[in-house]
Image (cartoon, helix red, strand yellow):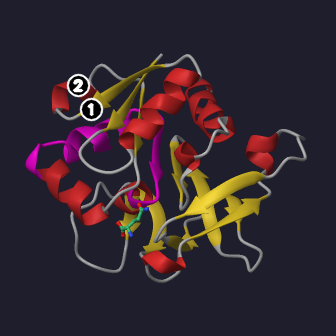
Amino acid sequence: MKIGVLALQGAFREHVAMLRGLGVDAVEVRLPEELRAVDGLIIPGGESTTIGKIATQYGLTEPIRELAAQGKPVWGTCAGMIVLAKDVGMRQPLVGVMDVTVKRNAFGRQVDSFETDLNIPAIQNGDPTPFHAIFIRAPLMETVGKNVQVLATLEDGTIVAARQGNLLATSFHPELTQDGRFHKYFLAMSQN
Ligand code: GLN
């Protein structure tokens, strides 16, 4: 299985390193033709306006939509989640395939970035160890469509991870930890 990581801007190297650590053939994707060779795609964290603009300039937006429509797993972390969302409450170039409403910078400014332990049954498989989640000027999901399964919330109910079939979105950055459980969950999505 070959997994692409959109490598236009942001934390793509960390995703590639995590995937390779799990024994996966991971490649950086910058051109539309590189998308044809992958079985799944991660859109990393960074700055969603920048990622969306460059993706549009490089003709990547439509091929990413097609990849998602083919049922291949696509995961957006943080800015990547914004790029995947259908509605972010402002005009910016998006892939726009996931039925969620996202609020950008929802927790405040860079200084308000935080880390917390989350209980995420879908990835823990009965393991009591919570997942350490890193939020960096993170977005949240305000509403999710009826086909969207909420995977994780903060204590106050704020939605920070969700799945819609082959699409996955997290407000936080699993690639900045040493915990591969979220990446393994994503890899397993191509089997079901
Ligand atoms: N605040 C960024 C945005 O709106 C996302 C931050 C991140 O990806 N860590 O695009």
Which residue bears the numbered disc 2? 34
Q: Which mark is residue 29?
A: 1
Compared to residue 115, the image places residue 44 above or below, namely above
SS assignment at label 1: strand
Q: Is residue 8 visible?
A: yes
Few, some or many C-alpha atoms within 10 Å of disc 2 (few <14, some 14-19, many ≥20)? some
At a point 48% along the width and 78% down the height, the residue shown is 111
Whether pointer 2 and pointer 1 mark residues with C-beta atoms closer than 8 Å, the reply is: yes
* Residue 147 in view here: no
Which kind of residue does numbered mark 1 sit on?
A: Val
The span shown in magenta is 57-79
Q: Is residue 38 above or below residue 145?
A: above
Whether disc 2's CB lies below 8 Å from ligand 1 is answered no
Question: Position of 122 compared to 52: left or right?
Answer: right
| Residue 70 magenta-highlighted | yes
In the image: residue 22, left or right of residue 153? left
Q: Position of residue 87 (x, y in %)?
A: 37, 71
Rendered position, 164 above or below 64: below
The outermost residue toward the front is 111
Q: Is residue 8 left or right of residue 159?
A: left
Residue 46 position within the rendered picture, expressed as x and y whole percent measured from the top left: 35, 57
Mark 1 beta carbon near ligand 1 (under 8 Å): no
**Ligand 1 sits in quadrant:** bottom left
Q: Quadrant of residue 192?
A: top right
Q: Residue at x 23, y 25 (%)?
A: 34
Q: Is residue 68 left or right of residue 125?
A: left
Residue toward you, 100 or 113: 113
Image spot of residue 112 (x, y percent): 53, 79
